[in-house]
Amino acid sequence: MNKEYYRRLVWNRLESEDVALPPYPVHGRIPNFLNAEKAASLLATLDEWKNAKVIKVNPDSPQRWVRMNALREGKVLIMPTPRIRDGFLALEGVDAVKASTIKGAFIHGRRLRSIDELLTNIKRIDLIVEGSTAVNPWGERLGKGEGYGELEFAILKELGIVDAAIPIATTVHDLQVLNDRLPQDPYDVQIDIIATPTRVIRVDRIRDRPSGIIWDMLSREKLMSIPLLQELFYRSGMAYNKNIDGRNHL
């Protein structure tokens, strides 16, 4: 079974059990789900959450409760902009309800578009919270299929803002937790903690995380659409080995 099979399985299951919430359609998204706030509340009881001063959270709808909790507790919230095209946003000391939405985060957050802005404003991230379509007890995760969560991790890892041991959590509905092994690629980032509305699952990861950006697996389209990636590409010296003008695509 390929990745798309498991994504469709979960999307269909959430719809058939009537636990999917807007935005619709659920297919093609990190699905919003009934009682997402309870999953966020359970996550907030863990030591990894309590000890974290800086938390990166994805911008999708079901994790709005996670972002809200972080801001209410006075943590620094780092949120990637959609498709990382405008870098990241840093939020602190702002209205938790208003700033937890994508629109509100753009209004109230500081935009960190360049490597220098990231390194100046973020010394270290203590916890990452990802949105997921499907997860399993081995820490294998599937997103919606575009790979931006993996790229966000890789960018931050290249810059030394996160390391391979950083705890990574996700909040999902219980129906999104599968007992099957999920297909994984070399760039996929495994998780440590699954919080659902009813329980917390601590996984025993069976794979190491990527050491950074795997340039040979990065499409030219993504490279050209994300300024931060282009900056890293040139700073890393990759431009001397490959060019991005169409003659030798990544």
Image (cartoon, grey):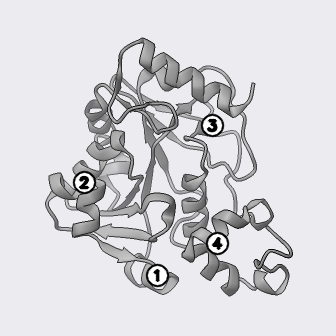
Alpha carbon distance from label 4 to label 3: 29 Å
Query: For mark 1, what is the residue?
Result: 119
For the point 53% across and 66% down, the residue is 162
**Label 4 SS:** helix
Query: For mark 4, what is the residue?
Result: 224
Horizontal side of 13 relative to 77 (left or right) equals: right
User: Residue 181: image x %, image y %?
Assistant: 69, 27
User: Residue 85: image x %, image y %?
Assistant: 49, 68
* Residue type at numbered disc 4: Met
Horizontal side of 54 relative to 10 (left or right) equals: left
**Label 3 SS:** loop
Mark whose residue sits in front, 4 or 1: 4
Mark 1 surroundings within 10 Å by alpha-carbon count, few (fewer than 14), some (14 through 19), many (20 or more):
some
Q: Are marks 4 and 1 in contact (CB under 8 Å)?
A: no
Residue 205 falls in which quadrant of the image? top right
Residue 15 falls in which quadrant of the image? top left
Which part of the image, by quadrant, shows the C terminus?
Answer: bottom right
**Label 1 SS:** helix
Mark 2 surroundings within 10 Å by alpha-carbon count, few (fewer than 14), some (14 through 19), many (20 or more):
many
Horizontal side of 146 relative to 86 (left or right) equals: right
Query: For mark 3, what is the residue?
Result: 140
Alpha carbon distance from label 4 to label 1: 22 Å
**Label 2 SS:** loop
The earlier-in-sequence mark between 4 and 3 is: 3
Judge whether 124 appears above or below 41 on screen.
Answer: below
Query: For mark 2, what is the residue?
Result: 100
Residue 113 seen from this side: yes
The earlier-in-sequence mark between 4 and 2 is: 2
For the point 80% across and 74% down, the residue is 246
Alpha carbon distance from label 2 to label 1: 23 Å
Alpha carbon distance from label 4 to label 2: 29 Å
